[in-house]
Image: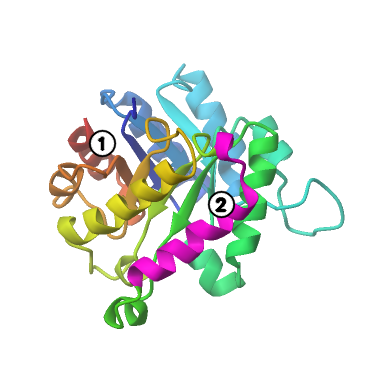
Amino acid sequence: MRRPLVAGNWKMNGTVTSVEALVTGLVSADSPSCELLVCPPSVFLAQVRAGLSVAGDEEKIGLGAQDVSQYESGAFTGENSADMLVEFGCRYVLIGHSERRQYHGESDDAVAAKVERCLAVGLRPIVCIGETLEQRRNGSVLTIIAQQLGALAQTVAREDWGRFDIAYEPVWAIGTGERATPEQAQEVHAMVRSTITDHGDSEDFTRILYGGSVNDDNAKALFEMADIDGALVGGASLNVQSFMSIAECAG
């Protein structure tokens, strides 16, 4: 069955000192019953892994990366391969975050190629999908989501649909203080769940997270929805108390 997952996306934040304090706070906090994951900037992966390892908490808190190359190796300056991330102890990687799509021009096909590369080396992707404010206002939300998932369907084999998770993150609710209501989120999650079921026997393995200004005030109501299996947390993941409060709400 699907165990709730709460993942912290630290984005481009942190210093050696602040990361040390954050990891220390996380490993000293009580463990919730959900699965926990942190995704620091790549330059801090080794530091975070070491902090979790010293505390013996590599099982309590998983390590993930914020992006990955779609290529195995080669002349791709500034990129990190899936093999490199695995060697650094990553179990997860975020793929297709709206900021990557918006600022780096990542297409649905590129996202699908990255997923395929990760699956080849046993790295579990969290595939981010979501609509802009304009797309929501013009009523094309479900069309956009279907398009984003469709690229995965054309690339990922049916038997592999249980080997990744999905994060629904309405672009208009990321870092804006705005957020989808639990009912709005559930509508999209239900559609995603139906698509997952259509593409393989993975309903019990693929979790659908909600991301978009999740905090300890709205987390409980979101997690009460039938198809919301956890959260992809941005700014609140940089605060130990807030992040762990969200995790407690997940179960």
The number of numbered badges drawn on the structure is 2
- Label 2 residue SS: helix
Q: Which mark is residue 247?
A: 1
Which quadrant is the N terminus positioned in? top left
* Three-letter residue code for mark 2: Ala
The reply to whether discs 2 and 1 touch (Cβ–Cβ < 8 Å) is no
Residue extending farthest right = 75
Where is residue 168 shown, x and y percent of the image?
37, 55
Answer above or below: position of 110 versus 222: below
Residue 61 x, y percent position in the rendering: 42, 28
Which tag is nearer the camera, tag 2 or tag 1?
Answer: 2
Residue 131 in which image quadrant: bottom left
Residue farthest along the top direction in this orientation: 56
| Residue interval drawn in magenta | 141-160
Q: Identify which residue is drawn at 40% across, 69% down.
A: 143
- Magenta span dominant secondary structure: helix
Identify the residue under disc 2. Answer: 153
Q: CA distance from mark 2 to mark 1?
A: 31 Å
